[in-house]
Amino acid sequence: MARSAALNRKTEETDISLKLDIDGTGSSLIDTGIGFLDHMLTLFSKHGLMDLEVKARGDLNVDAHHTVEDIGIVLGQALKQALGDKSSIRRYGSAYVPMDETLAFVAIDLGGRPYLVCNVKFSSERIGDMETELVEEFFRALSVNAGMNIHINVLYGSNNHHIAEAVFKAFGRALDEAAGIDSRIEGVMSTKGVL
């Protein structure tokens, strides 16, 4: 059964179309109007081995906040839809990713309970055309809409680009592990019987 989703979301602030295939190869086609976010989503797709297409238009004349947050919302909704009843998924995933002087660690739980812990510090207000505070906003929106617990910790690092890149790569790898199918798991990975 295909684990994929295609969603559209249009508001007064943004217009987003997104396609996600969990069991992909890491191919992507990203156009958000925010170059740095395009780069981060491409990294997430490649390292998570998930096919991702995103086309977004937002009120970038204001700032990037609405666009980044709304893409997180739609990606979270698509992930939730694509996972279906979550039968036989591993549920938990984690990954360490080094990027030169930076080391990032991400752990996730697809158990249906949204929560974000984001221990990431940036030394500049922007990376390229995106405000650095929007990294946390993106993952918060994703967590809430996917029903996913996400813990992000940057153990050390000084280059802001490397910090963000390590986080998105680690998230992709952790999600690939958590969403992976294990034939030994009958139903869902929970003693409650539901996720």
Image (tube, rainbow, N blue to C red):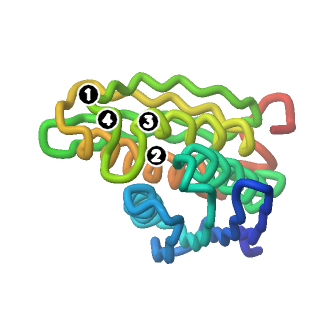
The residue pinned by badge 2 equals: 171
Q: Position of residue 36 (x, y in %)?
A: 38, 56
Residue at image coords 31%, 45%: 127
Q: Residues within 10 Å of mark 1 (few under 14, many from 20)?
A: few
Q: Report the front residue among 38 and 117.
A: 38
Q: Position of residue 93 (x, y in %)?
A: 52, 41
Q: Position of residue 55 (x, y in %)?
A: 60, 72
Tag 3, which secondary structure? strand
Give the answer, above or below, for where 3 lies relative to 84: below
Viewport quadrant of the N terminus = bottom right
Structural distance between the alpha carbons of marks 2 and 1: 21 Å
Name the residue type under label 3.
Val
Tag 2, which secondary structure? helix
Structural distance between the alpha carbons of marks 3 and 2: 6 Å
Among numbered discs 2 and 1, the one appearing first in the sequence: 1
Structural distance between the alpha carbons of marks 1 and 3: 20 Å
The residue pinned by badge 4 equals: 104
Name the residue type under label 2.
Phe
Residue at image coords 66%, 58%: 183
4 or 1: mark nearer the eye: 1
Q: Residues within 10 Å of mark 3 (few under 14, many from 20)?
A: many
Image disc number at residue 123: 1
The residue pinned by badge 3 equals: 106
For residue 134, side relative to residue 56 (left or right): left
Q: Report the front residue among 178 and 106.
A: 106
Structural distance between the alpha carbons of marks 4 and 1: 16 Å
Among numbered discs 3 and 2, the one appearing first in the sequence: 3
For residue 62, side relative to residue 125 (left or right): right
Whether label 2 touches label 4, CB < 8 Å? no
Whether label 3 touches label 2, CB < 8 Å? yes
Q: Report the front residue among 134 and 4.
A: 134
Q: Report the front residue among 186 and 194.
A: 194
